[in-house]
Amino acid sequence: MSKSIEKFYITTPIYYVNAEPHIGHAYTTIVADVLARFYRQEIGSENVFFLTGTDEHGAKVAEMAAKLGKSPQEFTDQISGSFKEAWKNLDISHDYFIRTTDAKHKKIVIDILNKLKDKGVLYEADYQGLYCVGCEKFILESELVEGKCPDHNREPQKLKEKNWFFSLQQFLPKIKQAIELGELLVYPASRKNEVLGLIDKQSLPDFSISRSRKSVPWGIDLPWDKEQKTYVWVDALSNYITALDYPEGEKFKKFWPADAQFLGLEILKFHAVYWPAILLALDLPLPKLYIHGFFTIDGQKMSKTLGNVISPNALAEKYGAEVSKYLILSQFSFGAESDIKIENFAEKYNADLVNGLGNLLNRVTNMVEKYLDGKIDLQFVDKKLAQEEIRQLRFREALLTIWQVIQNSNTLIDQEKPWLLAKDEKNKGKLEELLKELVFDLYNIATGLKPFMPEKSAQIIAILTADKIKKPTEPIFPRLDLSD
């Protein structure tokens, strides 16, 4: 990512409201939050826009609502509300939370549909195939396992109906060229190659943009055909521009194209093929896509049956918002397929935050208070610790860089033994220089942590820049009882 930027637009996927938020949703949102906070520091809050939200239409939503005896709107209000609550508990700093049931979104989607039809990229045709309600898509017979969808363990429906389709195939050469030229960034490189492979090796048919209202009763009516409901992709993917008041809104003119669209691997094709095709049809510039891999929980696939679906609210309640973000992002590098070791969170909290950063803060402030009466003559300069790693989305590596400084500082104390230096007046100058170095390092540790832990960072900076430095009366990171 370029350092000389004037605006930064960040999106998460809009999360489907068929279930409560889990740690998979949280990971993508936390990554976006850290990057948003970082760029607000760099270029000002007014030049950053961070979008998240919920995807609320479709047959699956109507089906779940009916099972619970609720209307689709009541059901979506409930689940969308649970996402808002989770992001509040994790202190997610989004600028806008979009819902595809919002009146503004629906109005702009209708405008987009009309534009696509006027441009001649939509056509009506019969479709016959196997449809999985759980996936909300048609699937091939070759994809079935013992006659069932492998992801949802249910037999697909055999459907034949008249739908409206988007002419995807005419855009595939342009999308391939855009990826190869870097006009459409797909990161990491392995996912870029995967998308190119999809285009080169697989038949990517035109995709349906509508379904019969009998099959999908919950959605946006096609403006020219009230017997058809808008189907998934034009509705859901368009949120990234409807949130900016496309086409004439000031936010749209300022912030599009997106500088970082974060998404999970399971929706790669739709974002790296369908979405660029829609944008090209609308004559709009293409975004930058950043894809994280699948991850397991303590070595197992996340599953309600296994009982390892981790709620963001449960994490925030136990560890607090900022510590939860640290524990998740320090696990593995962005883009990798990895394992989140929830069972080790408490131990890692005590090791890294209590014994590492918390202990360093206590040791240094105690010695400054004790040996220098809390007074230290020091001009603070921000060394911009780990900033380049954050720009490159290397969040774990940024934290490792910061924690290396913490480790080095604690080691320096053990080696130099300031408590011995303090016993001899002739060592006063050396002692003062040592403590200055330690305070300076702590300050830069705190500034480096601002995007990850803004409140803890502010607490540490306030302690170090006070007229008189004092050891905190309460530990900034209270120790957890590992027997719990």
Image (cartoon, grey):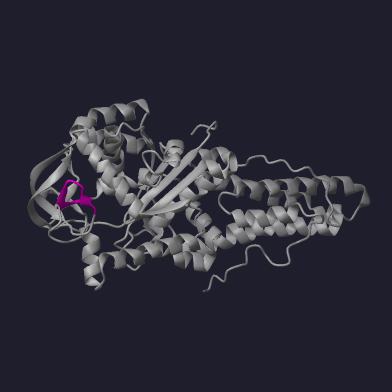
State whether the magenta stretch is mostly helix, strand or loop.
strand
Give the x, y percent position of residue 145: 14, 55
Query: Which residue shows up at 21% across the image and 65% down it?
Result: 63
Please say if 466 is above or below 484: above
Give the x, y percent position of residue 337: 37, 48
Query: Which residue shows up at 19% across the image and 56% down it?
Result: 150
Residue 229 among magenta residues: yes
Q: Nearer the viewer, residue 351 or 94?
A: 94
Residue 112 among magenta residues: no
Give the x, y percent position of residue 199: 23, 33
Q: Tell me, yes or no, if residue 165 can be seen here.
A: yes
| The image quarter in which residue 21 lies | bottom left
Q: Tell me, yes or no, if residue 348 can be seen here.
A: no
Give the x, y percent position of residue 46: 54, 43
**Along the horizontal axis of the image, is 10 left or right of 103?**
right
**Along the horizontal axis of the image, is 472 left or right of 272?**
right
Q: Nearer the viewer, residue 413 or 144?
A: 144
| The image quarter in which residue 348 lies | bottom right
Please say if 218 is above or below 236: below
**Along the horizontal axis of the image, is 40 left or right of 246?**
right
**For the magenta stretch, what is the residue range?**
220-231
